[in-house]
Amino acid sequence: MPITPYECPLLNSLRFERSESDGQLFEHHCEVDVSFGPWEAVADVYDLLHCLVTDLSAQGLTVDHQCIGVCDKHLVNHYYCKRPIYEFKITWCRKKMSLKSERRGIHVDQSDLLCKKGCGYYGNPAWQGFCSKCWREEYHKARQKQIQEDWELAERLQREEEEAFASSQSSQGAQSLTFSKFEEKKTNEKTRKVTTVKKFFSASSRVGSKKEIQEAKAPSPSINRQTSIETDRVSKEFIEFLKTFHKTGQEIYKQTKLFLEGMHYKRDLSIEEQSECAQDFYHNVAERMQTRGKVPPERVEKIMDQIEKYIMTRLYKHVFCPETTDDEKKDLAIQKRIRALRWVTPQMLCVPVNEDIPEVSDMVVKAITDIIEMDSKRVPRDKLACITKCSKHIFNAIKITKNEPASADDFLPTLIYIVLKGNPPRLQSNIQYITRFCNPSRLMTGEDGYYFTNLCCAVAFIEKLDAQSLNLSQEDFDRYMSGQTSPRKQEAESWSPDACLGVKQMYKNLDLLSQLNERQERIMNEAKKLEKDLIDWTDGITREVQDIVEKYPLEIKPPNQPLAAIDSENIENDKLPPPLQPQVYAG
């Protein structure tokens, strides 16, 4: 297509004054398909062409250009345009475009990571796209609405029961007796409803009634049991940390002990209700320190981290992957899914990481190690720290590969690849544990919240990964998932000269193993087919023999009388001549 590489800085047009005395301007547009500019600095034509070719080539396009002439438009007096016109030929292959379509399948806008209510905090799929704050508000609204509906339903049923009772009463004595029972039942029902509503809307810092608190203060087998070494260490560190806050520290320690004692008697509740108790405790303690204690926000954040570390170290074995949830089932499902996707290559995900570079390979190994190490931590903040370290290693690997800072579009596909390659243990349980019991301020803002939200998106993408996401045909995708075949490895001729010899040999061995596996499968299939043919042939011969035997049955007759020898004496038959006797003749 004909283009001109530059234009003057005003309206992409060339402007000339008709004369020194005439202020009117003459505008001229070259008759080309595309024009570029305006440019802020004077640049050489060849420099501009080089910029165009470089930028287009970076997008995976093949560019050829040639000058096809100049614009010979007469402008004014002896002025002619004389701007060069170049013809560009741009070609692209299907493979390059497929990579773009792959990226479109993985791309997630940053706005999609934020709370869908528009508060500006990071959302979470476990909270239906809300942040923790908005999710709690929506949850409480739904619960309050449900309670109100239940209350109205109970009142309506009571009115109907009263009307039915009034219409069916037969005698005064029976009426007074039954009505007194009905009034007693109605009073008990109202008392139970009011108690339920008050209990639901009461502050979470109130553990229970005085009787429950007294029972909680009594030593229990769970609290007095022999604690682990890590629990003792965390307890000592927490006490030493609170000593620097004097009176405020004593109040925090008292509230924390009451919370742990109260949680001991709430183990029969669902994990969601226990999570609500923990989140309410975080919120109340932080709000009390800021309003009453006038503690600066920075110190509040540090105190909340220590509180979370102390209480979650003690509650970990009771609230992590409890038996009342389907977390373990989800863990097995995602592990099975990742194993089935072991054939996915970085090229399919458009991962901008070159593992042939030793530094990049080390970063990838460190990222996988960090995401696997997450399961060994007991505190939600420590698990988030592992996710953050993994993400930073990913950014460093992309930066080394591309020689430029990584973007969000590069980060998410690489994170998906790391998860597929590492297959972290109990992935869903760890995500649910962080979501339920982490300090909500960490998940709503900051780099920890951003990286955790991306990890949730990566897991959701893996669960829904299909042929279209990888730009594969459904037939190839099904064959890869079933293990019948695997994508072709990189050919030896396409390796760069600087590639590691060990990596080349590894891929060569993998290719040989793949070929041997295919040959073995073919041999096994042929052997099974031969075995089946032999069985069918044997069965066929047996049936034919049986048919012949049934059609021509074998009859066995008794043997005949034996014949007498010719030379024996024949007593029974005198008509036979005697045996010949040898005679000697003299010559």
Image: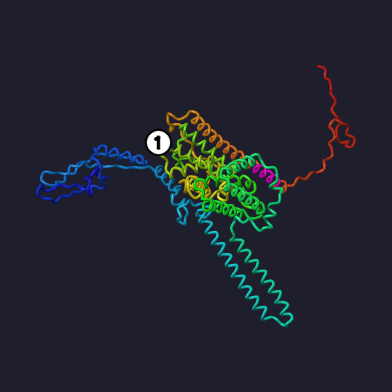
Q: Is residue 245 visible?
A: yes
Residue 571 image position (x, y, % from top left): 90, 35
557 and 68: which is toward the camera: 68
The C terminus sits in image quarter: top right
Residue 11 image position (x, y, % from top left): 23, 49
As drawn, is 49 to the left or to the right of 191?
A: left
Q: Is residue 328 visible?
A: no
Residue 552 image position (x, y, % from top left): 72, 47
Q: Is residue 530 above or below residue 432?
A: above
User: Hey, which residue is sitting farthest left in the picture?
Assistant: 21
Look at the image and say whether residue 532 sits in the magenta stretch. no
381 and 51: which is toward the camera: 381
The N terminus sits in image quarter: top left
Q: Amino acid at mark 1?
A: Asn
76 and 412: which is toward the camera: 412
Q: Which residue is mark 1?
A: 403
Dominant SS in magenta: helix
Provide the secondary structure element on which disc 1 rests: loop
User: Hey, which residue is sitting farthest bottom in the picture?
Assistant: 171
Q: Is residue 326 above or below residue 141?
A: above
Residue depicted at 40% across the width and 44% down the height:
97
* Magenta-tinted stretch: 535-546
Residue 134 image position (x, y, % from top left): 50, 56
Look at the image and say whether residue 538 sits in the magenta stretch. yes
165 and 198: which is toward the camera: 198
As drawn, is 99 to the left or to the right of 464?
A: left
User: Hey, which residue is sitting farthest front in the picture?
Assistant: 247
